[in-house]
Amino acid sequence: MVWKGYHEYQSLYMKALLDQNRTLQIKALQGLIKASKILGLDPTRYKNALRAVAPELVAKNGTKKSLKSTQKPAASVQKYSTGKTGSKRPRLMKSKVINGRFEMEFDRKVARKSIKHFILERKGRVLYVFDLKNLKVPFSIKRFRGRGFKEIRVARFDPKTVRVVIETRAPYKPKLSADGRRVTITLPPSAKNEKSRSKESPAANLSSKSFSKAAGAAYGKKSYTVVIDPGHGGKDAGAVGYKRKREKDAVLAVAKRLKKVLEGRGFRVYLTRDRDIFIPLKNRTRFANRKKADFFISIHANAAPKRSSRFKSKGIETYFLSPARSERAKRVAAIENRADVNDLDRYTKNTYLSLLNNKKMVESNKLAIDLQKQILSSLRKKYRGVVDNGVREGPFWVLVGAQMPAVLIEIGYITHPTEAKRLFNPNYQKLLAEGIANGIESYIYHNGI
């Protein structure tokens, strides 16, 4: 029940930030601090955010003193631990399904008490969730399919946590064991003797027709709703590149073409803007939530960090919402965020981003993988030198608050002479739109929603 309350306070805090409701922010942060104390979690980020939001409240009620006392976990709650303080964190080396078990092998001993687990039930599915603290994985997400279970997902839940989710259609009683470097979880009885099939980037190169037929037949949903967000607009031109070409114009043209392609495949499609107007970032995902969208796709064009690198900086990359893990991601996010979030303090931004480690991040990551693969496949049919800059994580505020898988696609560098010309070429725009549509259908085909 405490974990449920903790997650509810997280959702409440996100809503308060989006609605700019200061009273609700304070209430949610106080709840998160209290729940963190009971669960033995570090409440520092919530305390800092509360000080930033309501410094007078801290002084008036003496909260400052009481907040310090919450730093130590309750005595009845076990700390996550993997060994001696300062020791290196165990790293996942191998994972496989074998003889009705899911086995993970690490490069050093894993403590049983460092593993917490809980169960979630969602619309005919049962999710068995195992959180392994103070561990590392060499990838963002890895998936296994097999008999007896729908899917096993191994993902980096946050910088120090590995999350394993075993998804089944019927309940069973898993058994967990940690024997030295090996962690084992039993699977449903029907999974025995089934060979594992792992997929790190599940996005087959199917035709658009086979995508649509397979998705519709497998999941029985007649129509999916997509909200397309052409970046910038109005007073915010976005990046201005080669021969004064403007980002806001290029992305609007691509968004309109993508709308036509998706509607031709039976999707219900909305644009956050269909003309040259400015829309605040937070209003874009609000619009998607009101439309009950299944996907939110924000389209942008990148820019070289400095004039001297305009010929070197090129390529396509797809982002999903997460605290930035690289200087590149921070730089790109800073450019795309600058129109609308300058009034948010550092603690508010960091606290909000720290709450994003949930299933939507994993789903958005999976969508980004499929989109990136299909975009490249489509463009490379007729254009040479299309650079793959990969799938990346970044704190893009236009994605904040989305209640569906949400990504931001940088469709090319408007500062690069060749790419700038292509971004305004109707043939290139068409292939780009088809690639994005294929990516969405690839996600539906492999995952369903």
Image (cartoon, helix red, strand yellow):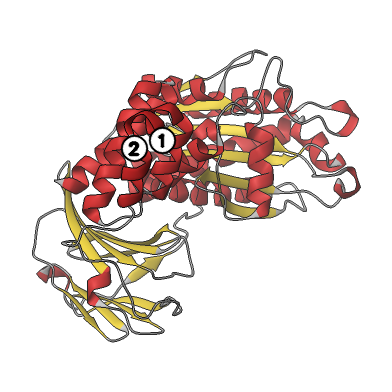
The numbered dot on residue 279 is none
Task: Name the quadrant containing residue 196.
Answer: bottom left
Q: Badge 2: few (under 14), some or many (20 or more) residues near its Cα, within 10 Å?
A: some
Indicate whether 284 appears above or below 301.
above
Q: What element carries label 2?
A: helix
Indicate whether 89 appears above or below 131.
below
Q: In which quarter of the image is the C terminus?
A: top left
Task: Name the quadrant containing residue 167.
Answer: bottom left
Residue drawn at (33%, 24%) of the image: 24
Residue 83 image position (x, y, % from top left):
34, 80
Q: Badge 1: few (under 14), some or many (20 or more) residues near its Cα, within 10 Å?
A: many
Q: Is mark 1 on a helix, strand or loop?
A: helix
The kind of residue tagged 1 is Leu
Residue drawn at (64%, 12%) of the image: 277
Residue 154 showing in the rendered view: yes
Which residue in the structure is indicated by mark 1? 50
Residue 219 showing in the rendered view: no
The mark closer to the camera, 1 or 2, is 2
Q: Please state which of residues 34 and 1 is positioned toward the viewer in this rendering.
A: 34
Which residue in the structure is indicated by mark 2? 63
Q: Please state which of residues 135 and 197 is positioned toward the viewer in this rendering.
A: 135
Q: Earlier in the sequence, mark 1 or mark 2?
A: 1
How far apart are the alpha carbons under marks 1 and 2? 10 Å
Residue 318 image position (x, y, % from top left):
58, 46
The kind of residue tagged 2 is Thr
Residue 190 shown left or right of residue 198 in the figure: left
Residue 57 image position (x, y, % from top left):
38, 28
Q: Please state which of residues 446 and 243 is positioned toward the viewer in this rendering.
A: 243
Indicate whether 131 appears above or below 331.
below
Q: Mark 1 near mark 2, Cβ–Cβ under 8 Å?
A: yes
Residue 326 shown left or right of residue 191 in the figure: right
Residue 18 image position (x, y, % from top left):
43, 25
